Image: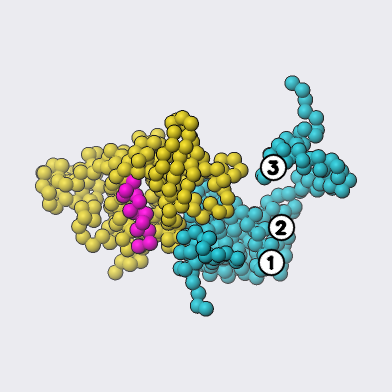
Chain colours: A cyan, B yellow
Amino acid sequence: MREKNPIETLIDLMARLPGLGPRSARRAVLHLIRKRGALLAPLAEAMAQVAATARECLNCGNVSTGDVCPICADEARANGILCVVEDVADLWAMERAQVFRGRYHVLGGTLSALDGIGPDELRIPRLKDRLAAERVTEVILALNATIDGQTTAHYIADQLEGRVALSSLAQGVPIGGELDYLDDGTITAALNARKRF
Amino acid sequence: MEWRDTGILLGTRRHGETSLILDVFTPERGRHAGVLRGGTSRKMAPHLQPGGQLDLRWRARLEDHIGAFTVEPQRSRAAAAMGDRLALSGLNAVVALLRFCLPERVPHPALYLRSERLLDLLGQPDLWPLAYLRWELALLEDMGFALDLGQCAVTARTEGLVYVSPKSGRAVTAEGAGNWIHHLLPLPPVMLGQGEAEDSEIAQALDTTGYFMEHRLAPQMGDKPLPEARARLLDRIRARGQRTAP
């Protein structure tokens, strides 16, 4: 069998990335080769660096290049509020909003009977340890508004009840959302969580 | 091959980047799987939560192919369940038990009807635990492990039934129990449709149905352990019973 050349290997690897298929991978690789100096070399260098240094933060589970991520290392963010998220992507989404100024705790998934994920597979014991160590006064359960997400939120609430103030994100109409296009579940949740105007 | 039916969504699995494999429970065709193209889209996500009621159209070239679904949401039950711990645990337990014991493509119309009615009661926490207990009894019956609680297995009396035989699943009176009393399971009045149906009594009844699920039903399912979701629901009912106890 003919051995693949490096360009074909790169196309095959790129095609495995989310959102890309063989055709879009070929286009991306061709674009990188054409912009070798401006894109390909810096990209290769950045990827090599990330491959060598990326790891999970020992404290919160965020992805960073050191043992402790910049958020956990920042003393200004030790305000006693901890935001529990399912995944690193959710942490990044919260950071994009630039509203929350406390620290995070990444669970690494949700309880799921289907996938065999029980409480022991999540970073819940570490969360309990952090409450005392970081003098946490409030835990915000910022988990997805799905059955699995909310099951996990209730489970964590059971575990932490009485030890710390608990809150969760509101559920309802998104910004720019039109009632006519919302599903009945979202409308029900919004109505249940209505507030005085 | 093509059919159209209504169904309860039991769960989803990712299939490639944009598709899902839906696991649904329908009245005519029982538990059925199929691919839903574009199922991971943000538009579809709210409708594809477990327990949701869907209008389903299934197409495949051959009967034994997995086939593809097109779905139209009918009603969501997730919103009613999410805000309430007991309801959420209940929804998880029902869906997990149906997935645990239903074979694929075998119709169970009576169980379907009961499951649909039970899930529609999710927003009513006062009725829910009792309805759930009755549903578990119906589930056992539908799976071929019906409990016979009409008369005593020893004395044939129809009154004073307080135990269930773990061997036969039949009711037993105190006098019929004799020396076997320590081997028998409790039969709280709520299992006979009597009494106040307190949470603590329902939890005791669920321990009895749980015995038959674990020792009769589970061995038929390849000896898998009962879903943890059921144990969590039981804990919630017990905890509520303790909070409301005088």
Closest to the observer, B84 or A84 = B84
Q: CA distance from mark 2 to mark 3?
A: 29 Å
Q: Of circles 1 and 2, which is in front?
A: 1
Task: Read off the magenta span.
Answer: B112-124
Instruction: Check disc 2 and report the residue beneath it.
Output: A69
Closest to the observer, B193 or B173 = B193
Instruction: Check disc 1 and report the residue beneath it.
Output: A98
Q: Is residue B85 above or below residue A122?
A: below
Q: CA distance from mark 1 to mark 2?
A: 17 Å
Residue type, numbered disc 3? Leu
Q: Chain of mark 3?
A: A
What SS does tag 2 mark? loop
Q: Is residue A24 above or below residue A93?
A: above
Q: Which mark is residue A20?
A: 3
Which residue does the image show at 26% across and 60% down from the upper left?
Answer: B197
Q: Are marks 2 and 3 in contact (CB under 8 Å)?
A: no
Closest to the observer, A91 or A126 = A91
Residue type, numbered disc 1? Gln
Q: Of circles 2 and 3, which is in front?
A: 3
